[in-house]
Amino acid sequence: VPTWANNFAETFLATIVPLVELQSAQLFHPSAPLIADLLETSSVGLSWFRELVGSLSTRPLHFLHELAPTCGTQWKPISDAGRQYRGQGKSLPCHAECYTHLRYCEFNSVFGGDWPQTLDVWNVGQHLAARLLTPLFFSDTATRADNHKLRILFIQRNKKNVNGVREISNAEDLVTHCNAVSHYSCSMHEFGVGGLVHDVKKVRSYDVLVGMHGSALSFAFFMHRNATMLEVRPFGFEGAEWPDRYFAQPVHLSGAVYHMQLSIGAPELCTPTHPLNIHPIHVQKYASCIIPWSSLARALLNIDWFMQPSCTKHDLIQVPKAERCNGPPRLSPHEQSRTSWTARIIVAY
């Protein structure tokens, strides 16, 4: 039974993660049909929900209301002067759906308490990616590509979506600045348009995922090991009680993908403005913010310092030596002196 299934990220955390845990414990087989107790009138887009949850079974995903028996009285409408009336009715017998075994699972809410220390969202993402992608493509994108450029993907949000106004409003300008850096390769991508397989293939080809706080950031769980999620937070959207529970805490527990936070520190960078004492739950719904390139550049420098081939950081990060020592550093001594991976929160003014 999915809970907090309002978007892709909440469905991944509250439904996909426990389902994969149940599969790993062999409590249900991948050939078992999955039935979601979710009404069609829910805010969930049924197409992506079917694709995401249905990827865990070889059988088609069904919703509980779809399996309900069609029975009772069916009325045949009749028309008179352009208006329809209920006409003659006929009785339909009820045909029950029968199963030899049934497991009914009610999952905990995303915000129902502390995350378990065994939570590993990255391994769950890799489990799904292995099911969705060809074995060759999955293995080829399991680690960072051996090239000199840092590949950076910016999340593009469509303003026609329900919460599309929560976006980086100057994203195109940032991509232009980003591509002006010789060792960066930057582009934009709108998730949820080309299908789940297309999105997973796209994100696995990049090293850094940049986006305003939103469900598309959960695609970082599908990225290769040691990739980075750069979460941009609108002004006032801070705190462990609510904002950190979506991405910062799960990513920290996983330890395979790194989380960096870029917080908007000046209210005038976001529209519409709001009172300083507003609760974070209300801030994250509507903020459209501008990120100064200088702030983003500093965050990317920190990420680049961490990800560059180097043999001098053995005691700071747990990265296999083979992945750290296969090329010259991209950052100059001056750039290295200005940054450090220990600064995981950048504030933009």
Image (tube, grey):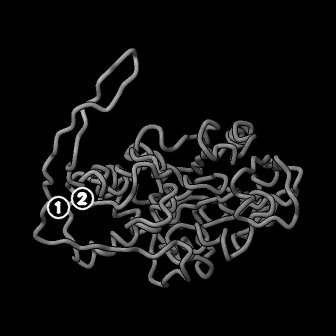
Q: Is residue 251 left or right of residue 42?
A: right
Tag 1, which secondary structure?
loop
Closest to the observer: 329 or 208?
208
Location of residue 333 in the rendering, given as x and y in whole percent from the top left corner: 76, 62
Location of residue 181 in the rendering, given as x and y in whole percent from the top left corner: 70, 43
Closest to the observer: 120 or 139?
120
> At 20% from the left edge and 55% from the top edge, which residue is drawn?
58
> At 37% from the left edge and 46% from the top edge, which residue is drawn?
197
Disc 1 marks a residue whose amino acid type is Ser
Closest to the observer: 232 or 3?
3
Location of residue 41 in the rendering, given as x and y in whole percent from the top left corner: 44, 49
Q: Is residue 258 left or right of residue 33?
A: right
Mark count: 2
List the residue tagged with mark 2. Answer: 57
Q: Quadrant of the N terminus?
A: bottom left
Location of residue 67 in the rendering, given as x and y in whole percent from the top left corner: 23, 54
List the residue tagged with mark 1. Answer: 31
